[in-house]
Image (cartoon, rainbow, N blue to C red):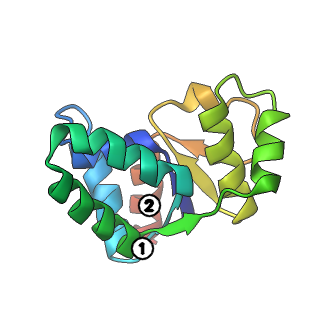
Amino acid sequence: MKILFDTNVILDVLLARKEFVQVSARLVGMVESKTIEGCLCATTITTLDYLISKALTKNQAKIEIKKILELFYIAEVNTKVLEFSVNSTFSDFEDAVQYYSGECCEVDGIVTRNTKDYKNTKLPVYTPDELLGIMASQLMN
């Protein structure tokens, strides 16, 4: 299963967000074990670096970004993605860019804690708990 991870799910892990880290870390673990083919939008990388550099040192942030680049496929952001995004009905441009970069690299779905940001889309959108449940049931079969 090829899944685009929203920025917030990765931040849950990198910043050890108490409420969310356990489930999000399990999903990232499934990317590490190749149970899930994990994808990130290219813009997610710069956002992650900016945000985690505030919580960690610049050097620690760079180390984390390198780990992410080894684990995840990076979905490109090109003119087509940006044109789709700017002409879309998404209320948030960043969400639109993430969505269309995922669509262009043919992901099977998106995992996010903000499912309301992805209303009326063709791709399935899962919360981390929902995706973990789906993956657990697939592994049992």
Give the label on residue 2, or none: none
Q: Position of residue 78 (x, y in %)?
A: 73, 58
Residue 19 in view here: yes
Query: How would you rate the neighbour count of disc 2 (Cα within 10 Å): few for under 14, some for 14-19, many for 20 or more?
Result: some
Local crowd size for mark 1, using a 10 Å CA cut-off: few (<14), some (14–19), many (≥20): some
The disc placed on residue 135 is 2
Given the image, on which type of amino acid does mark 2 rest? Met
Residue type marked 1? Thr
Label 2's element? helix
C-alpha span from label 2 to label 1: 8 Å
Q: Are marks 2 and 1 in contact (CB under 8 Å)?
A: yes
Instruction: Work out whether residue 124 can be spotted.
Output: no
Looking at the image, tell me whether mark 2 or mark 1 is earlier in sequence order: 1
Q: Position of residue 43 (x, y in %)?
A: 53, 50
Q: Which mark is residue 35?
A: 1
In-image side of 93 versus 139 (left or right): right
The residue positioned 42% from the left and 73% from the top of the image is 35
Q: Name above or below for residue 64 compared with residue 10.
A: below
Could you say whether the residue bearing mark 1 is in a helix, strand or loop?
Answer: loop
